[in-house]
């Protein structure tokens, strides 16, 4: 698996824009150090191969009493 | 008589039922104690004095007329400032929600009221339940230390004997962490066992509602009043409610308890490990059979926990973080903004791994009644302490230290009760947890009670 590009202010600003989140330069500077830690945690989710495993979703089509 | 505020919920319920104490007098004593302690501990977002005294007067009339509703009748309790209480603010201990007023009781508050409980106040939470420290509040065992979180106000008021039960929520450990750090019992039921209708959400996939209380029996009684299907909560489980007290005193002879050989005892303070292993040894002496188990996929537990929690929390806060960002505390604001940048495929990967993890834990539980490990890895840190340095030189963020061992029961949805196990570094409380099968609350409470009977930690309290 390719190594994730470390987060930098430009990358974070672009990601925030895509997420429709307006972040000031000061706020971006504060977030950058945290993001690599978060992404490292999330990258671990893709290390194995889940095969046909479905997601654990609770939606039930049956209508319940109001 | 010992000070009535030192009694457990079940003990004070017996006094109320026998009319040896009035609910009105008890509520007044509770509120007076809370007010005397509040300058030191700051456990409460607000007191609900008017509602409490009205409920206490009603309880007095009913008990005098022989209409006893059960062991919560007339008992002063508190709820976390996430639970809607009709007509009152539910601020989630946040300036963001300073203007939020509940129009109806949450399901748990409804059920507590139906049981005749007297709600004396709403306890502080780490802002929006998104943390382990509850920075507003001091630990009654040492106010320079955190009470844990996010249900830190509930843990603190119980330790300080302000009330007899305090509701919490648990998304990554937020009932069990303050229970362990404040020296109380704390029960996170099975996912879906207790309705979350009317509780501000942190993460719909991981949120659980449950009690902190002085004793295991107090948790059992409270669960009996709260448990049950509620169509208003999409995660609510339509599973019959058990009597959680009926097997409490049956002991552990013949029960099989798993003891982890990995994960639960790694990077744990020596006193925490010692006290947990002593508890396990006592259960063996009481007749339990111990079985070594290996926790599956330990390296992925935190990833699944945060992979679910971060995007769900940010989805809940999507509007507020855009309109009121500067009103959030810095740590919560960071999590929420970061959560908006989590790709959907990461969230779905977490959901898929949750399915795999659930199956792996089911296999591990084959032939077992429960597994036991420390509830948290360390005693309460100082309020200004951001990290813990382990003996091998590894530095770990405080948030990770306290969530690490509690997250498995959130990811798997399995019931877990935290029980006081003694004291550790600095004379601060330690706790261990008993994790059970789905809807196996009666069994884990029985195991926890069997240990509790061998020790007197539940009677210990901070010096006044």
Image: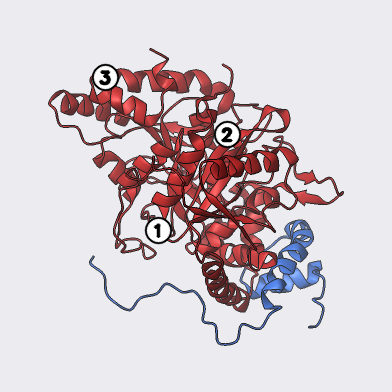
Chain colours: A blue, B red
> Which residue corresponds to the image point at 31% horizontal and 61% vertical from the top-left?
B232
Image quadrant where residue B235 sits? bottom left
Check whether the beta carbons of the residues at disc 1 and disc 2 lie within 8 A of each other.
no
Question: Disc 3 is attached to a residue of which chain?
Answer: B
The N terminus of chain B, quarter of image: top left
- What label does residue B268 carry, if any? none
- Relative placement, left or right, of B179 versus B393 is left
Query: Which residue bears the numbered disc 2?
Result: B182
Query: Which residue bears the numbered disc 3?
Result: B22
Of mark 3 and mark 2, the one earlier in the sequence is: 3
Of residues B313 and B424, the one drawn nearer to the viewer in this rendering: B424
Helix, strand or loop for disc 3: loop
Which residue reaches farthest right?
B393
Image quadrant where residue B146 sits? top right
Mark nearer the viewer, 3 or 1: 1
**Few, some or many residues within 10 Å of mark 2 (<14, 14–19, 20+):** many
| Same chain check for tags 1 and 2 | yes
Of mark 1 and mark 2, the one earlier in the sequence is: 2
- Relative placement, left or right, of B406 versus B261 is left
Residue B147: percent from the left, percent from the top? 60, 36
Query: Which residue bears the numbered disc 1?
Result: B439
Which residue reaches farthest bottom?
A52
> Which residue corresponds to the image point at 57% horizontal and 71% vertical from the top-left?
B360
Of residues B111 and B188, the one drawn nearer to the viewer in this rendering: B188
Image quadrant where residue B21 sits? top left
Residue B192: percent from the left, percent from the top? 40, 60
């Amino acid at each position: 698996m390719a190594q994730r590009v470390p987060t930098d202010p430009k990358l974070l600003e672009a990601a925030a824009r895509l997420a429709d989140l307006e972040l000031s330069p000061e706020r971006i500077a504060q977030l950058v150090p945290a993001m690599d830690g978060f992404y490292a945690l999330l990258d671990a989710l893709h290390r194995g191969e889940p095969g046909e495993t479905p997601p654990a979703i609770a939606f039930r089509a049956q209508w319940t009493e109001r | 008589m010992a000070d009535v505020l030192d009694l457990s919920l079940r003990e004070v319920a017996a006094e109320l039922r026998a009319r040896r104490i009035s609910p009105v007098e008890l509520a007044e004593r509770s509120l007076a104690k809370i007010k005397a302690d509040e300058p030191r501990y700051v456990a409460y977002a607000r007191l609900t004095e008017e509602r409490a005294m009205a409920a206490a007067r009603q309880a007095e009339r009913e008990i005098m007329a022989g209409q006893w509703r059960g062991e919560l009748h007339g008992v002063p309790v508190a709820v976390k400032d996430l639970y809607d209480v009709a007509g009152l603010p539910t601020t989630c201990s946040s300036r963001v929600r300073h203007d939020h007023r509940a129009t109806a009781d949450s399901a748990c508050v409804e059920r507590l009221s139906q049981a005749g409980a007297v709600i004396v106040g709403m306890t502080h939470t780490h802002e929006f339940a998104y943390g382990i420290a509850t920075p507003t509040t001091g630990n009654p065992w040492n106010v320079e230390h955190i009470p844990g979180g996010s249900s830190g106000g509930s843990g603190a008021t119980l330790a300080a004997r302000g009330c007899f039960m305090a509701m919490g929520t648990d998304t990554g450990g937020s009932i069990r962490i303050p229970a362990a750090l404040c020296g109380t019992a704390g029960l996170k039921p099975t996912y879906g066992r207790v309705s979350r209708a009317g509780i501000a959400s942190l993460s719909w996939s991981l949120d659980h509602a449950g009690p902190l209380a002085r004793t295991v029996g107090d948790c059992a009684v409270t669960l009996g009043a709260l448990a049950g299907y509620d169509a208003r909560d999409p995660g609510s489980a339509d599973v019959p409610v058990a009597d959680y007290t009926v097997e409490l005193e049956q002991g552990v002879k013949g029960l099989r308890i798993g003891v982890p050989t990995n994960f639960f005892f790694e990077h744990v303070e020596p006193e925490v490990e010692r006290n947990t292993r002593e508890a396990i040894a006592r259960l063996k002496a009481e007749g339990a059979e111990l079985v070594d188990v290996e926790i599956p996929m330990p390296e992925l537990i935190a990833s699944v926990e945060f992979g679910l929690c971060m995007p769900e929390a940010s989805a809940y806060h999507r509007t507020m973080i855009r309109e009121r960002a500067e009103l959030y505390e810095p740590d919560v604001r960071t999590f929420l903004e970061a959560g908006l940048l989590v790709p959907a495929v990461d969230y779905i990967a977490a959901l898929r791994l949750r399915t795999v993890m659930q199956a792996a834990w089911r296999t591990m539980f084959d032939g077992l009644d429960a597994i036991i490990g420390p509830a948290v890895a360390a005693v309460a840190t100082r309020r200004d302490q951001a990290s813990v340095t382990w003996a091998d030189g590894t530095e770990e963020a405080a948030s990770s230290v306290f969530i690490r061992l509690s997250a498995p029961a959130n990811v798997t949805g399995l019931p877990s009760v935290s029980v006081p196990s003694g004291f550790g570094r600095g004379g601060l409380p330690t706790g261990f947890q008993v994790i059970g099968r789905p809807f196996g609350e009666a069994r884990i409470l029985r195991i926890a009670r069997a240990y509790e009977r061998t020790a007197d930690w539940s009677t210990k309290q901070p010096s006044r």
